[in-house]
Image (tube, rainbow, N blue to C red):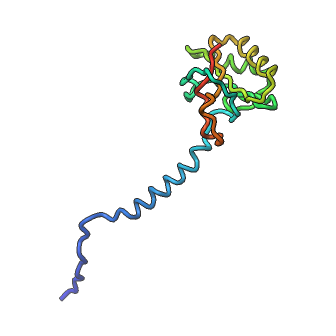
Amino acid sequence: MAYKPVAGAQMAAPNVIPMADIMLVLLIIFMVVTPMLQKTHQVDLAPTNNAHDMKDADKDDAVVVAVTRDGTLYLQNNKITKEAITNEVKDEIANRLDKTVYVKADARAKYGDVVAVVDEIRSAGVDQLGLLTEKVGRRTSSPQAQTPAAGGQL
């Protein structure tokens, strides 16, 4: 006579506790990493009262030039010199139908630096130039909470 082990009782419902634990860990990881993902260099935008919403500036393919308070320039989150910005902007907008470039200038950046950048961008053949600012009522203490969706069109 052969020994036949007795099988335990069948489980009627799947055990979802381990799956829930994994999902919570993934949620925490994404919550920590998401604020670190930025398309452009972070600057403190100038506050304005009469800003217009520019939703196209938040798109992934938007051409954004950032001017920091010390005059450093960033094109698409890459550091660039003022002399090279005309050629780089030409390359960025060469195959685009919408030739709009957005300028994010720090509120404490020198006015002359921002004007020089705007002149260089204009000489690259840009059709539309948007100056990104922040609505006065939206100012927060967290730099991640600031959205560059407000500004004026030149």
Image spot of residue 153 (x, y percent): 62, 15
Q: Is residue 15 left or right of residue 61?
A: left
Image spot of residue 37 (x, y percent): 60, 41
- Above or below, comparing residue 29 to residue 50 in the picture: below
Residue at (61, 29) in percent of width and height: 148
Looking at the figure, which quarter contains the N terminus?
bottom left
Give the camera-side residue of 61 and 51: 51
Which residue is farthest left? 1
- Above or below, comparing residue 110 to residue 34 in the picture: above
> Which image quadrant is residue 98 in?
top right
Image spot of residue 57 (x, y percent): 58, 25
Give the camera-side residue of 131 and 140: 140
Residue at (24, 78) in percent of width and height: 7
Residue at (66, 29) in percent of width and height: 76
Give the camera-side residue of 58 and 108: 108
Residue at (52, 54) in percent of width and height: 28
Q: Is residue 116 left or right of residue 13?
A: right
Q: Is residue 33 left or right of residue 118?
A: left
> Which image quadrant is residue 14 in?
bottom left
Looking at the figure, which quarter contains the C terminus?
top right
> Which image quadrant is residue 137 in?
top right
Q: Is residue 131 left or right of residue 26?
A: right
